[in-house]
Image (tube, coloured by chain):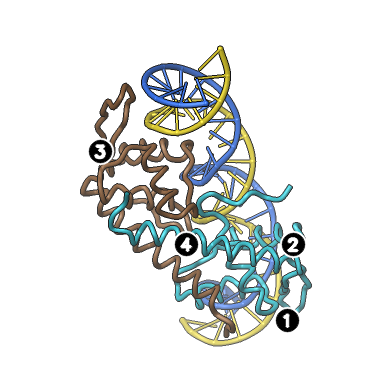
Chain colours: A cyan, B brown, C blue, D yellow
DNA sequence: TTCTCATGCCTCGTCGTGCGAGGTATAGTC
DNA sequence: GACTATACCTCGCACGACGAGGCATGAGAA
């Protein structure tokens, strides 16, 4: 059975990670940095969130990884699988819905 | 010490509840219904989330309540306190930041 | 030399909170 | 007599976000 959609707003980390990886292969540390930069400091993902998330995503078949040595340092590069792409589409759609819902609440000045 | 801001995206229920109550006094059941309607079904708040949230909000001094009997049914009406208004402003600002951050991630097509 | 900082990975334990399920009661309707 | 809508509530779980901490390397400062 597929995971139920959250009624309100969970799983944003999963969304942004998948989205970043949709462009190109990246490694963990790079993801964290890029997220911070691109979101202009609005979003930060701690390593305690990021790495477990990446592992879970891979275990669920949404990501594939390969390790690479650079300057004596190990990098684990991740890329989206087809399932990962589908999952991303779904999450993004969901995000829009939610986000627009919240905007409607925030924006409205009168309610019936 | 005041509560730390969430790094990613928590507390949306609190935000929308406060926002709805910023307009006018409402009771629990009405809040749930209104949220659903105004958000055009995008947002739903279960009673298992709503009522505990309302109690917590009141305990923290962000809401005030009064009970009212209507047709033999008890309604608990809530309204924002000044602190509640300030909290709402803060949460709303935070939401915008986060939300725009996510949009930047979703919208961007290339990253450096 | 040693120290510190940036890079790069990881895990553990906790805490909050979102959420379903369930419980109570009244009024109206089929 | 049953079922729906209204209206409140609590319990307990599960899961996810998070901080703190740990390990290792390379580069530059002191």
Seen at 49% across and 52% down, the residue is: B41
> How much space separates mark 4 and mark 1, taking CA atoms?
40 Å
Residue matched to label 4: A99
Q: Give the mark toward the camera: 2 or 3.
A: 3
> How much space separates mark 4 and mark 3, taking CA atoms?
28 Å
Left or right: B42 as drawn, with respect to A55: left
The dot on residue A70 is 1
> How much space separates mark 3 and mark 1, taking CA atoms?
59 Å
Disc 1: host chain: A
> How much space separates mark 2 and mark 3, taking CA atoms?
47 Å
Q: Give the mark toward the camera: 3 or 1.
A: 3
Q: Residue A32 placed where, x, y %?
A: 57, 71
Q: Are marks 2 and 4 on the same chain?
A: yes
Residue matched to label 2: A58
Seen at 70% across and 60% down, the residue is: A57
Mark 3 neighbour class, 10 Å CA radius: few under 14, some 14 to 19, many 20 or more = some
Seen at 58% across and 83% down, the residue is: B111
Seen in the picture, residue A65 relative to D19 is either above or below; the reply is below
Q: Are marks 4 and 1 on the same chain?
A: yes
Q: Are marks 1 and 2 on the same chain?
A: yes
Question: Which one is earlier in the sequence, the residue at label 1 or at label 2?
Answer: 2
> How much space separates mark 2 and mark 4, taking CA atoms?
27 Å
> How much space separates mark 1 and mark 2, taking CA atoms?
22 Å
Dot 4 and dot 1 residues touching (CB under 8 Å) = no
Q: Nearer the viewer, residue A7 or A42?
A: A7
Q: Residue A68 placed where, x, y %?
A: 77, 77
């Amino acid at each position: 059975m597929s995971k139920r959609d959250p009624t309100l707003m969970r799983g944003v980390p999963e969304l942004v990670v998948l989205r970043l990886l949709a462009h190109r292969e990246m490694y963990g540390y790079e993801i964290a940095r890029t997220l911070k930069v691109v979101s202009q400091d609005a979003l930060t993902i701690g390593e305690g969130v990021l790495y477990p998330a990446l592992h879970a995503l891979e275990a669920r078949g949404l990501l594939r990884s390969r390790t690479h040595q650079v300057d004596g340092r190990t990098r684990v590069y991740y890329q989206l699988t087809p399932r990962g792409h589908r999952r991303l589409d779904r999450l993004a759609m969901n995000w829009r819905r939610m986000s627009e819902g919240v905007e409607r609440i925030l924006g409205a000045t009168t309610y019936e």
